Image: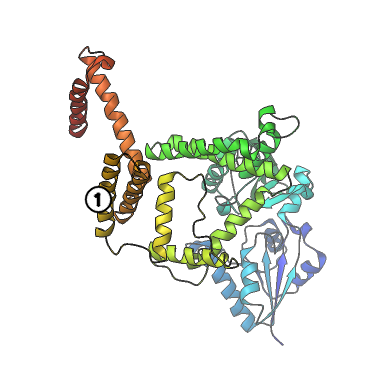
Amino acid sequence: MSSCLHVIGLGPAGLNQLTLGDYRLICNADKVFARTAQHPCIEDLKAEGICVESFDEIYAVETSFEAVYERITEKLRQELQKNSVVIYTVPGHPMVAEKTVQLIGERLTQDYKVIIHPAMSFVDEIFRVLKFDPIEGVLIKNYDGLKDAALTGQEWLVIPQVYDKLIASEVKLDLMNAYTDEAEVYVVQALGTALEQVDKLPLYQMDHGKFDHLTTIVIPPNTEVISFYKLADIMRTLRSEGGCAWDREQTHDTLKKYLIEETYEVLEAIEEKDMYNLCEELGDLLLQVVFHAQVASEASEFEIRDVLRGVIQKMIRRHPHVFGEEKAETADDVILTWDRIKLKEKENNRQPDLFNDPKGLPALMLASSTQRKVAKVGFDWPDLKGPWSKVLEELHELESAMAEGAGIREELGDLLFAIVNLSRFLELDPEEVLRDTVHKFQNRFLKMVELSGKKGSDFENLSLGEMDIFWEKAKSQEKSGNQV
């Protein structure tokens, strides 16, 4: 018969919380191992003359907790190879915030019998001292797992084993990313012992006290937490009967113009490299997404979670080189993979819709997208000479149309289309190029007006020739960087 490992939970406090059966098992053992001797129950057992060997010396020599837990697990394996019964004790409940027990389940259960002896956990004592029912919702997170926890403030947040001030300060800073500085926090220590202490204080003062291995941070539900849920909840409130009259009147159609405006304000912030404004404008754009989702929810069309689910599944599905086994070394490889998967998603259509761009797309962007799509199926020039010759050809045809006074609109469109195609070969975005040129023109014009004003001239009364003189001066200053 294989050896047996008894994993015994010691509870959060002293010997009086240990079950009678577990106590007898410990008393009858030749040797008892403990993850750490820094626990009230271990101190009580030693006081009764029970031999306990702790693994605290491993903590002193290893550089990470992961390495500590690995070594403890291997040490227990070695003991099981020598003994038929091994006793291993851990603080609290063996299945609550106990990494070594998880490793034992992964590494030892295939070769040895493992019996888990449950006990009262530190969480049970928290329910007692703070007098709340866990049915309200409880989230238990280790101190190093807060950064990516997506906290919502809807539940009680419990952070165990905040054992020193450095960890406490890191926890505080992580929490301040979601909670307000004044958020209510409980610092609970040595629960169930004579030294039990519970302090309530604002978050910004949380790390000012003393901390040890029996310290736990607890934060009650908080409606002020910064989260996506909070934004969606605000929108639900605005659209509710007691909310905002304007917000309640909006529909998908009435919101279209605001979506366009916010999108272009984001683009403007990017072009101006104004990160402060970009942060604000991205928030405004996100609000439009949540707004449309709420309108759809009220009409029982879809929910915001459906929007999130759809984009999450799409990103995973279209990135098999990241979330799967495929390989894509370059950006071009990624685009090919993306297009292949996108086409497969629409394979049920007998005739794939090649030109499926939004109808409201700006003309330059629409032209560029159209040319990229036909190029993918082989309808393209072999090199830069082709689109350049096409631009010259269309320019000549426009000149002829202007001389004849017919077909000017069509030929101008052909010229613009050819220039967009040329920009693709030059690896330039025509929308961005034209936008930059417009801004350059605006700046030069304003500088021209400024220069004429300094000369005491009324700009609107200048002749075109005089205006051209100031234009060249503005252009010259722009190129030289001279703002005088």
Answer left or right for 451 relative to 124.
left
Percent position (x, y) of residue 440? Answer: 29, 34
Q: Residue at x 26, y 16 (%)?
A: 459
Percent position (x, y) of residue 320? Answer: 51, 67
Q: Is residue 278 above or below residue 66?
A: above
Extreme right residue here?
Answer: 20
Answer left or right for 471 relative to 12.
left
Residue 344 makes an appearance in the image: yes
Percent position (x, y) of residue 305? Answer: 66, 51
Extreme bottom residue here?
Answer: 1
Q: Is residue 335 above or below residue 441?
A: below
Q: Residue at x 62, y 51 (%)?
A: 307
Q: Secondary structure at mark 1?
A: helix
Q: Nearer the viewer, residue 107 or 245?
A: 245
Q: How is the image coloured?
A: rainbow
Q: Nearer the viewer, residue 223 or 107?
A: 223
Residue topped by disc 1: 392
Q: Nearer the viewer, residue 35 or 144?
A: 144
Percent position (x, y) of residue 136? Answer: 77, 47
Q: Which of the 4 image quarters holds residue 481?
A: top left
Q: Give the amino acid at mark 1.
A: Leu
